[in-house]
């Protein structure tokens, strides 16, 4: 049994989830469904492409100035 990361974000009415270690992506109407789907997608992927340990991904956050969006809209 291996443990992988899941990065989840909401897009309109669906939750989109990505596994950064292997690059699989899935979605679901709920977080639970999205996680179930990414697990299945990752298991299927690993059947075809065995996992090569490259270390854990580094997860962090960063900030962007809010005015960047406004400035872009003014130029358009």
Image (tube, rainbow, N blue to C red):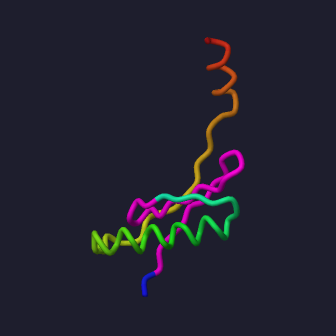
At a point 67% along the width and 70% down the height, the residue shown is: 32
At a point 43% along the width and 65% down the height, the residue shown is: 57
Residue 35 coordinates in the image, percent (x, y)? 59, 69
Segment colored magenta: 3-24
Residue 26 coordinates in the image, percent (x, y)? 52, 59
At a point 28% along the width and 69% down the height, the residue shown is: 49
Residue 16 coordinates in the image, percent (x, y)? 59, 55
Left-right relation of 22 to 65: left
In which quadrant of the rendered image does the N terminus lie? bottom left
Left-right relation of 43 to 54: right
In which quadrant of the rendered image does the C terminus lie? top right
Closer to the camera in the image, 37 or 22? 37
Residue 55 coordinates in the image, percent (x, y)? 36, 72
At a point 66% along the width and 27% down the height, the residue shown is: 69
Work out whether 26 lies above or below 72.
Answer: below
- Residue 19 in magenta stretch: yes
Work out whether 22 lies above or below 61.
Answer: below
């Amino acid at each position: 049994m291996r443990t992988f990361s899941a990065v989840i974000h909401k897009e309109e009415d669906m939750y989109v989830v990505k596994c950064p270690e292997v690059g699989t992506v899935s979605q679901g109407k709920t977080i639970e469904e999205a996680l179930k789907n990414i697990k299945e997608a990752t298991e299927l992927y690993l059947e075809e492409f065995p996992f090569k340990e490259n270390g854990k991904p580094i997860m962090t956050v960063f900030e962007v100035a809010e005015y960047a969006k406004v400035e872009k809209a003014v130029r358009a």
